[in-house]
Image (cartoon, rainbow, N blue to C red):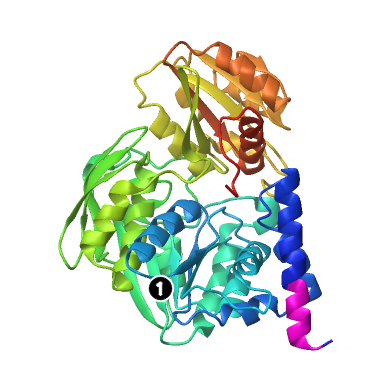
């Protein structure tokens, strides 16, 4: 069959699968359409990506991809870019293919000038090869899903090889506070822009036990930190060889972070931006500063950037607020030790009585190995909770971990909907239920919320 006919057949197949999935409400149609369409026509993504006159941008890292790309998408659209974005967070190549299929006409035409794709860290080398991005935004590298990714040093080696092969006209946006990232781009071509946080008030008094990369990327010696912001992120240097954190050109200061929002100043080469961000936690400050750095590198003016940050809302499952009667549910994705610790660090500032609904799954997208929960600082919850209900496919494992941490577990129920109603019973009028969930558990919970009419589907 001729390539054009195969492409049309693949696009038709993908669109049909999406309509079926969404009509039956068995998912958002964010991966399967692209998977099967690409099986029919393997060159589909490569063919369609050539449609964009302004090329494409990739956002990657272990944590914060969905939020950073959502913030950047808003800035680019406001600046006039007709942007195609995989906003549902389906960040493997089949997710990218699905977005392209839905945007394309049957003849393969796409009405967009720029592609913006968040990409899974293990998929990045393939994405660089197939998408030929003009820019790559790198948030961080943390330990995550060891049974799938291996150690983060393995992921870093794959990244380094990919960056060395990229053409000289590409742009890398790099979190300077992550020594693993600043080390792996040695030898990379293209233009480099660093971002970070310069705020001593946020410094932690000791290195968290979940910290991953504490060694010099040049000589292998232990790093010394002048300031630790979270995990292994901060202001570091090597006393043995002198290697140190690059100076960021865009950075945040004067940070006041709360469980629901934050205020801070972003210092940029074109002047400061004072921002009120309706997203919780220090980790979202990093996401915002990364998005700002990328937007500035693409020529977006500061006034547009600031306005978009002020209007930003939480992507689904990442601090999403759900109203149920006179109570509020805050849904937080927590899928690895560093991410979980930062969510706990944020939530514990909530002045309201602490009520928790914790969900742990071990499906493929979560990672089968859940031993990482023993590196989460659940001890910080001991003596500070009013109720804790646990659910998910590995609820019993999580309940055991909480018991060892000295946290009283109110109830354990692997059936998510039943467990949710049980958790809600303990929350008083005008109270808040903090729901912390791994990736597929978050999707399970949102399906329950959808059935109850409390949220909209991802495709709506």
Q: Which residues are magenta?
A: 2-10
Could you tell me which residue is drawn at 56 percent across and 35 percent down? 455
Could you tell me which residue is drawn at 29 percent across and 68 percent down? 300
* Pick the front one: 447 or 271: 447
- The image position of residue 287, as x and y in percent, is 39, 53
In the depicted structure, whether residue 168 falls above or below residue 17 = below
* Pick the front one: 426 or 224: 426
- Location of residue 314 (image quadrant): top left
Q: Which residue is mark 1?
A: 172
Mark 1 crowd level (few <14, some 14–19, many ≥20, 10 Å Cα): many
In the depicted structure, whether residue 355 falls above or below residue 191 = above
Could you tell me which residue is drawn at 18 percent across and 68 percent down? 269
Whether residue 227 is visible, yes or no, is no
- Location of residue 11 (image quadrant): bottom right
* Pick the front one: 240 or 270: 270
**Helix, strand or loop at mark 1:** strand
- Location of residue 299 (image quadrant): bottom left
């Amino acid at each position: 069959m001729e390539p054009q006919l195969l492409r049309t057949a693949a696009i038709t197949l993908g669109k049909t699968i999406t309509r079926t999935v969404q009509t039956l409400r068995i998912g958002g149609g964010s991966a399967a359409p692209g998977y099967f369409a690409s099986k029919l026509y393997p060159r589909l993504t490569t063919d369609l990506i050539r449609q964009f006159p302004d090329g494409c941008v990739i956002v990657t890292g272990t944590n914060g991809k969905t939020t950073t790309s959502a913030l950047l998408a808003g800035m680019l659209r406001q600046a006039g870019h007709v942007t195609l974005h995989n906003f549902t967070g389906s960040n493997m190549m089949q997710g990218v293919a699905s977005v392209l299929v839905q945007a394309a006409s049957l003849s393969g035409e796409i009405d967009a000038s720029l592609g913006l794709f968040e990409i899974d860290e293990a998929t990045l080398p393939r994405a660089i090869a197939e998408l030929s991005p003009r820019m790559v935004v790198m948030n961080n590298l943390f330990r995550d899903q060891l049974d799938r990714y291996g150690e983060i040093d393995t992921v870093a080696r794959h990244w380094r090889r990919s960056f060395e092969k990229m053409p000289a006209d590409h742009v890398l946006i790099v979190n300077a506070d992550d020594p693993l990232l600043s080390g792996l781009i040695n030898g990379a071509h293209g233009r480099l822009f660093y971002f970070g946080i310069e705020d001593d008030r946020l410094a932690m008094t000791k290195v968290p036990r979940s910290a991953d990369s504490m060694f010099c990327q040049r000589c292998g010696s232990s790093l010394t930190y002048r300031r630790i912001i979270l995990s292994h992120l901060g202001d570091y240097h090597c006393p043995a060889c002198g290697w140190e954190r690059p100076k960021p050109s865009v950075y945040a200061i004067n940070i006041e972070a709360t469980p629901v929002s934050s205020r801070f100043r972003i210092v940029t080469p074109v002047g400061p931006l004072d921002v009120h961000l309706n997203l919780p936690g220090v980790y979202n400050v990093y996401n915002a500063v990364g998005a700002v750095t990328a937007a500035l590198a693409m020529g977006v003016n500061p006034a547009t950037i600031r306005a978009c940050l002020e209007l930003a809302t939480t992507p689904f499952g990442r601090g999403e607020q759900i109203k149920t009667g006179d109570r509020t549910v805050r849904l937080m994705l927590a899928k690895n030790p560093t991410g979980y610790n930062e969510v706990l660090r944020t939530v514990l500032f909530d002045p309201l009585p602490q009520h928790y609904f914790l969900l742990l799954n071990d499906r493929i997208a979560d990672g089968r190995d859940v031993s990482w929960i023993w590196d989460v600082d659940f001890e910080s919850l001991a003596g500070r909770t009013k109720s804790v209900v646990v659910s998910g496919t590995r609820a019993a494992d999580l309940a055991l971990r909480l018991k060892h941490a000295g946290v009283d577990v109110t109830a354990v129920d692997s059936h998510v909907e039943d467990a949710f109603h049980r958790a809600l019973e303990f929350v008083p009028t005008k109270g808040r239920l903090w729901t912390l969930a791994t990736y597929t558990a978050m999707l399970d919970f949102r399906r329950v919320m959808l059935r109850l009419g409390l949220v909209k589907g991802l495709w709506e």
